[in-house]
Image (spheres, rainbow, N blue to C red):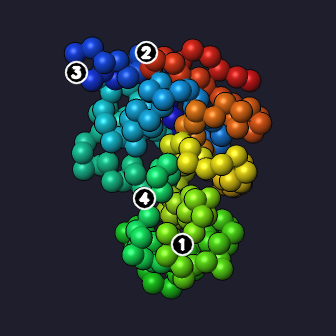
Amino acid sequence: MIQMYHVYKTYGKDLEALVDVSLHIQKGEFVFLAGSSGAGKSTLLRLIFRDELPTSGQILVNGRNLVRMKQRAVPHLRRMLGIVFQDFKLLRDRTVEDNLALVARVVGLPGPEGRRRVAQLLKLVGLSHKGKMPPYKLSGGEQQRVAIARALMNDPLILLADEPTGNLDLELAVDVTRLLLEVNSRGTTVLVATHDLKLAEEAGRRTVFLKKGRIVEEWP
């Protein structure tokens, strides 16, 4: 599903964000990308959704070579991806339902179908009762669950989550991780960047460790 071959990403003359990264993630896998701040986790995710290009190396997502991809094909690539950010990026002046409905329109779901999809996803993340509320009235964990629901609106093949529990306390972080595991159990490939090694260990899923842009370890 995701294949990276000898990927390098350098900023300026000598800032090496990724160094000789080769990584294969199979369809339906749940993988943690672990490491401290500055290890290269976010850069790696940005390369996968083609927010940036590698300095050298090859990246394939669902069989498509991102390095050779034309710019006009990038929106099609992103329709198969769901992306969850640490800072939620929800619209404060819209309700929870409106935040999701906006994405439904963007991905081309007509009115009735879009409303059904919004209701379905709010039920999945356990927030059916808070659809009429603005996001700023929700807890951090609830806002992150809304962000996950939004990322699932286009029924993505791959879900990328960049430090989705970074702003949450332990109990809420466990709750969000449990939700991501539930998403994975439905067939979605999930890649989660995290600095929380304890959370990754307790989830018991494949974990790839980055340090100074290099893959240094992997378990189990």
Q: Is residue 1 visible?
A: yes
Cα distance between the residues tagged 2 and 3: 17 Å
Of circles 3 and 1, the one toward us is: 1
Which label's residue is closer to the chain start, 4 or 2?
2
Q: Give the spatial CA distance, label 3 vs label 4.
A: 29 Å
Residue type, label 1: Lys
Quadrant position of the C terminus in the picture: top right
Element on which disc 1 rests: helix
x%, y% of residue 20?
Answer: 43, 15
Q: Is residue 101 left or right of residue 203?
A: left
Q: Which residue is mark 3?
A: 12
The residue indicated by pointer 2 is 20
Q: Amino acid at mark 4?
A: Lys
Do tag 1 and tag 2 residues touch (Cβ < 8 Å)? Answer: no
Residue 151, above or below 70: below
Identify the residue at image location x=24%, y=50%: 72
User: What type is the residue that disc 3 sits on?
Assistant: Gly
Closer to us: 4 or 171: 171
Tag 2 and tag 3, C-beta contact below 8 Å: no
Q: Nearer the viewer, mark 2 or mark 3?
A: 3
